[in-house]
Amino acid sequence: MTICLSCQKEFVSTTGKPQKLCLVCRKDRLARTWKKQMRIYGMAILAGLAMLVYVYVQFKGHQFQGLQGVPVSLLGMMVLGGLGVMGGLFGFALAIFFHLWHRKPSR
């Protein structure tokens, strides 16, 4: 018999491999993992949006002719903001997909 590291209950490993968590604790940890990922990607989206809003305000305040006179820092923030929004949306969608895939079946 093995003791679960999370709930401290004894359990028998059904896979034959040594396990550290019982089946209930493993499923709970898996469900929390996807919710944690959704929060992280949501914060990445918000950070990217904040960067894009800041760059937009800077562009609106100045009269640039194309991208010739734009400081490199603004261009970098624009690129990082876009990556934050697009990467965050992709990761968020992926986390929702896996959260729905691993949820408990309704009976």
Image: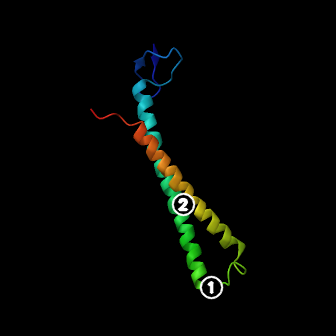
One can see residue 62 in this view? yes
Residue occupying the point 42% across, 17% down: 11
Residue 85 x/y as whole percent? 54, 60
Q: Secondary structure at mark 1?
A: loop
Closer-to-camera residue (15/101): 101
Q: Is residue 64 left or right of residue 36?
A: right
Mark drawn on residue 85 = 2
32, above or below 64, in the image? above
- Using the rendered view, name the quadrant where residue 52 is placed: bottom right
Q: Quadrant of the N terminus?
A: top left
Of pointers 2 and 1, the one earlier in the residue sequence = 1
Residue occupying the point 45% across, 19% down: 3
Q: Is residue 82 left or right of residue 34?
A: right
Closer-to-camera residue (83/54): 83
Which residue carries the number 1 mark? Answer: 62
Q: Residues within 10 Å of mark 1 (few under 14, many from 20)?
A: few
Q: Secondary structure at mark 2?
A: helix
5, above or below 72, in the image? above
